[in-house]
Amino acid sequence: MQFIKIIIAATALACSGLSSAQNYPSKPVTLVVPAAPGGGTDILGRAFAEQLKKRLDQPVIVDNKPGASGMIGTQAVAKASPDGYTLLFTYSSPIYYAQHTFNNVPYDVKRDLAVISEVATNTMILMVNNDVPAKNMKEFVAWAKKEKGRLSYGSLGTGSGGHLTAAYLSKSQGLEMVHVPYKSEAPFAQDLAAGVVPWGMGTLAPMLPLIQSGRVRPIAVLSEKRLQGLPNVPTMKEEGFPDPELVTMSWFVFAAPAATPKPILDRLEKYAREIAQSPAMKARLEELGMDAVGGSAADFRRNFDATGPLIEKLVKISGARNE
C-alpha cells in the first residue's frame, strides 16, 4: 500500500511539473546578473533580457547581484525554485574559475545549475591608466620592473580570467605586483581611469568610452587575432609574448536551477540560441567587442570539462588560490 502511495505521489508530481511547463511563463521572469550595473556582463545581460522578453511574451527583470567574484548572484539562482522564473546570465568567473580558485564555493556547477547555453565569448585586454609611461608591452614590462614591488593591478574579481592572466604575467616576468579585486568591471574601469590602480585586464564594452576619452590606453589584446573594435591594438603574441597562458577567453552563459523541468530548459535553450545568432544581437556583440556562440547545453558540458585542467594549471602557476 505504501509503495502504491509513493507511485501515485510521484505521478502527481510529474503531471504537475508537466502542466507547469506547458503554461510557462505565466508571470514575469527574473534574470540575475552577478555583476554591478555598467559592466560588460550587465550591458550584454540587459540586451539578452530584451530579446528574451520578446520570445517569452513576459517581462524579464534584470536583478544585479554583484560580489564574491559573481558567486553571490550565482548561488542565489542555484538555490532558487526550479520553475524557470529565476534565471542566470553570468560571466566566466563563478562558472568556470571559482571551483579552481576558492576552497568553499557555495554551489556545484554540475549539480546545482543547468547551464542552458554559452551565449557569447569575450576577449581580455591589457590596459593602463593614461599616466603610465608605456605604449607597448616592451615599455610596459620595463616600467613595471622599474617600479617592482610598488605596483598593483585590478580585475573584475578574484579568480576571474583577467586576474589569472595578470597574475601569471606578474609572476612570469618577476614583477611582484599586488592584485586588487573588484566586485565587477564597472567600478574597476572607473578606478583605472582615475589612476587608483595603474593597470589591469578588462574588456572592451565598459572601457571603450574611457579609451575614446584618452583616460585609459589599451596595450595588447589577449586573443589569437586583433579585435575589430580595436584594430590598431596588437595581440600579446605580436608584442613578443607568445605564452598560451596569455591567450584567454571569457564566456557569457545562461543558466537555470538544476531541477528546472526539461521542457522549460529545452524552450529556453532554443530561445538563447536564436538570440545569440540573431542579427540584432550579433550587431550588439560586435559593438561590445564580443563574438556570438549560441551553443547547446551539451556544448557547454564539453567545454566545461575541456577547460577545467587548463584553468587549474593557470591558477597553480599564478598562485591565485592563495588569495
Image (cartoon, rainbow, N blue to C red):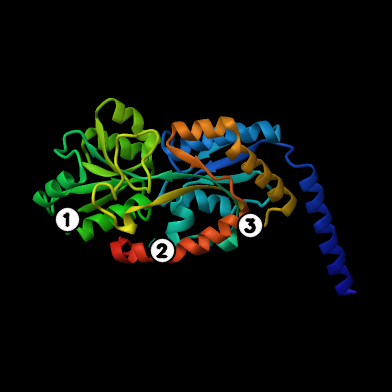
Give the vertical position of 42 relative to 157 (above or below): above
Mark 3–mark 2 distance (CA, rounded to whole Å): 25 Å
Label 2 element class: helix
Q: Nearer the viewer, mark 3 or mark 2?
A: 2
**108 with respect to 232 (left or right):** right
Q: Earlier in the sequence, mark 3 or mark 1?
A: 1
Residue in view at x 87 percent, y 64 percent: 8
Q: So how many labels did they put on this image? A: 3
Residue in view at x 32 percent, y 52 percent: 163
Instruction: State whether residue 102 appears in this view.
Output: no
Where does the image place residue 118, in percent across and percent down from the top left? 55, 49
Amino acid type at image mark 3? Ala
**47 with respect to 133 (left or right):** right
**29 with respect to 138 (left or right):** right
Evaluate if marks 3 and 2 touch, with contact meaning CB atoms under 8 Å apart: no
Quarter that holds the N terminus: bottom right
Residue in view at x 29 percent, y 50 percent: 237
Where does the image place residue 65, in percent across and percent down from the top left? 48, 43
Evaluate if marks 2 and 1 touch, with contact meaning CB atoms under 8 Å apart: no
Instruction: State whether residue 124 appears in this view.
Output: yes
Mark 3–mark 1 distance (CA, rounded to whole Å): 43 Å
Pointer 2 residue: 310
**45 with respect to 19 (left or right):** left
Pointer 3 residue: 258
Residue in view at x 52 percent, y 30 percent: 283
Pointer 1 residue: 175
Label 3 element class: loop
Q: Which numbered dot is residue 272?
A: none
The crowd level at tag 2 (other Cα within 10 Å; few <14, some 14-19, many 20+) is: few
Q: Nearer the viewer, mark 2 or mark 1?
A: 2
